[in-house]
Image: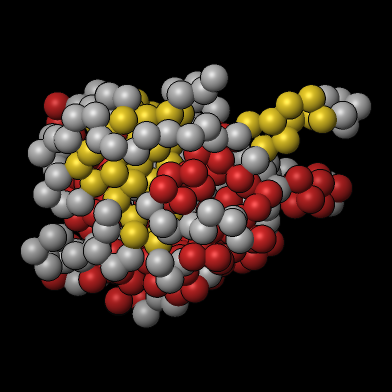
Amino acid sequence: MREALIEIARQESNQGWMDPGVGIGPRHGPEPVAMPNRSGRRGRRWRGVGAADRLEAEDAEIAIACASHQGEDEHIATVRRLLATAHVPEEALRCGPQLPSDEAAARRLLASGALPLPIHNNCSGKHAAMLATCAVMGWPLDGYMDPAHPCQQAVSGAVQEMLGVDLDAAPRGIDGCGLTTYGIPLAAIARGFAAATADPAFRRAQDAMAACPFLVAGTGRFDTALLEAAGARLTAKIGGAAVWAAVVRPDGPGIAIKLEAGGGEAIPVVAIAVLQQLDLVDADVPERLRSFARLVLRNWAGREVGDIRAEPIDMSPTAPQS
């Protein structure tokens, strides 16, 4: 049996299941919170202006900045358009080359004789947004991933304020795309997503993700399907190592899930079960989400040998935390 840590929070309080205070590395999940346009909870913007406002960014460019995409053609084109809008060369990306996670896109790339580039990295949209912010703010492009760089200082400051954690005291590591990631309580992620709903820039990111769900993830991905089915009611984003966060529109609650096994394949199954408990997804799962509600396991011969499904859970809080 796979166990899940689940946290549901409003700005003032939260309730958790299975020790939600455990420290985790969110890895990609908080992009909508950290997107380089957001204002502080009191309406402050970085040096008085938002990068997306200055660039007149469209929904697609904002959505790709919040994405963990699959390197499909539309993803790559949108990242390139964002870089071009900010007059930033593609070579400035430092996220490292990665073969597209979409199988068809990967096959086309390799069949063409080309090699994967940093722009194919699933985090290239976030990196492009950071570089665009540097261009707008007059910060150097070189070293934009360094924790001491003004861009990362602004990002960590925004995340720290929204999540209500001291990142200076938090354990840290380096993510696959080269950016610093922090060990923070699951409760802080849920509470941070709830708090972010008061921020007009975060709401703009929510609108962009709902308008362009394909750009947030891609073909066959749960977040894209969920945003297509319910983007007007909630915003969701998966992270690495089986972390998933969501927030109900317009003002919460925030939801954070972590699977202890560390594999993310069961995230959609658990997430749909939680959303059903919150009456955000019908008991009769919509057709668009049905394939995610139960994950069929097959052997190499294609024979069904098992499945991953959610068992009924008691959603009454074990220990509400303030």
Color theme of the render: secondary structure
Q: In this rendering, is residue 9 above or below 241? A: below
Examine the rendering and report whether any part of residue 3 can be seen: yes
Q: Give the x, y percent position of residue 237.
A: 44, 50
Q: Is residue 54 left or right of residue 148?
A: right
Q: Is residue 299 left or right of residue 91?
A: right
Q: Is residue 34 left or right of residue 216?
A: left
Q: In this rendering, is residue 18 above or below 124? A: above
Residue positioned 60% across, 34% down in the render:
309
Q: Is residue 44 left or right of residue 108?
A: left
Q: Please tell me in which quadrant of the rendered image residue 22 appears.
A: top left
Examine the rendering and report whether any part of residue 60 can be seen: no
Residue positioned 48% across, 35% down in the render:
312
Residue sitting nearer the eye, 289 or 155: 289
Looking at this view, name the residue that lies furthest to the bottom: 56
Q: Give the x, y percent position of residue 78.
A: 56, 67
Q: How many marks?
A: 0
Q: Please tell me in which quadrant of the rendered image residue 201 appears.
A: bottom left
Residue positioned 54% across, 19% down in the render:
1
Looking at this view, name the residue that lies furthest to the right: 301
Q: Give the x, y percent position of residue 59.
A: 45, 74
Q: In this rendering, is residue 300 above or below 135? A: above
Q: In this rendering, is residue 235 above or below 244? A: below
Residue positioned 15% across, 31% down in the render:
168
- Quarter of the C terminus within the rendering: top left
